[in-house]
Image: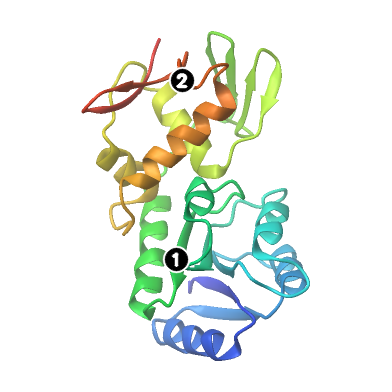
């Protein structure tokens, strides 16, 4: 079955070029040119990947991404200009799975899609009734919710994935390259800074004092681990 891709950008020439190239690879491509149209299409269809520009009329890409995450885990690749805040994008506060900057080569687009597809194939289904309890933290793997001292913590898709991997393998140290491979996929073309930013954002959400973490620790020169 062909992968269904939604391309969202108000620059019609860019959309046309991406659509043509992806269709040559056998993908089924839909297009949207503003944020509201994109949101309605995502609600009405089951896409495998969404390429979502940040600067859009009607509703910006950040808002679209946030609203999509209220009802769907469809992989989203944000597209942004060089002048955008890369730290914000890398942190994926909006629930995105990856990002690209303009201008980009269509081969990069295909590489990002391939990386996400390969990562998703390596996700191992878990017992949906399983709850993980670690001190004051409870992880509900059925709905991917995290609670600390009874308070629900809002995590992005990747923040949850990183935390679940660490929690289910307590005291095991994961280097940045290993986390990139396991969470983002073997073909992910990003760099290790992606991991560092996610860990920092995660600590800001789950730790009482991020500079003195209780849960996610650093083993200097080696990587990160969940202390049990």
Residue at x-position 60% and y-position 85%: 11
In x, y percent, where is residue 40?
76, 68
Residue 130 seen in this snapshot: no
Residue at x-position 47% and y-position 60%: 99
Q: CA distance from mark 2 to mark 1?
A: 30 Å
Residue 174 appears left or right of 11: left
Q: Quadrant of the C terminus?
A: top left
Q: Which mark is residue 211?
A: 2
Q: Which mark is residue 15?
A: none
Comparing 223 with 150, the one in front is: 223
Residue at x-position 53% and y-position 8%: 135
Q: Secondary structure at mark 2?
A: loop
The relative height of residue 204 versus residue 50 in the rendered view (above or below) is above
* Residue at numbered disc 1: 100
In x, y percent, where is residue 30?
61, 80
Residue 74 appears left or right of 223: right
Residue density around tag 1, few if under 14, some if 14–19, many if 20 or more, within 10 Å: many
């Amino acid at each position: 079955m062909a992968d269904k891709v939604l391309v969202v950008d108000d620059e019609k020439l860019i959309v046309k070029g991406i659509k043509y190239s992806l269709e040559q690879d056998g993908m089924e491509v839909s297009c949207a040119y503003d944020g509201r149209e994109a949101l309605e299409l995502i609600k009405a269809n089951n896409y495998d990947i969404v390429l979502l520009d940040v600067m859009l009329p009607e509703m910006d890409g950040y808002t679209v991404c946030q609203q999509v995450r209220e009802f769907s885990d469809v992989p989203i690749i944000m597209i942004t200009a060089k002048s955008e805040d890369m730290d914000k994008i890398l942190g994926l506060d909006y629930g995105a799975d990856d990002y690209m900057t303009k201008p980009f080569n269509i081969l990069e687009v295909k590489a990002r899609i391939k990386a996400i597809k390969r990562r998703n194939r390596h996700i191992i289904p878990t017992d949906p009734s399983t709850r993980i309890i670690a001190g004051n933290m409870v992880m509900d793997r059925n709905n991917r919710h995290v609670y600390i001292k009874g308070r629900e913590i809002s995590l992005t898709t990747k923040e949850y994935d990183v935390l679940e991997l660490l929690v289910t393998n307590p005291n095991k140290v994961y280097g940045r390259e290993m986390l990139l491979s396991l969470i983002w996929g073997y073909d992910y073309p990003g760099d290790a800074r992606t991991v560092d930013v996610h860990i920092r954002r995660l600590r800001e959400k789950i730790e009482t004092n991020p500079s003195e973490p209780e849960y996610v620790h650093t083993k200097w020169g080696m990587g990160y681990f969940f202390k049990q």
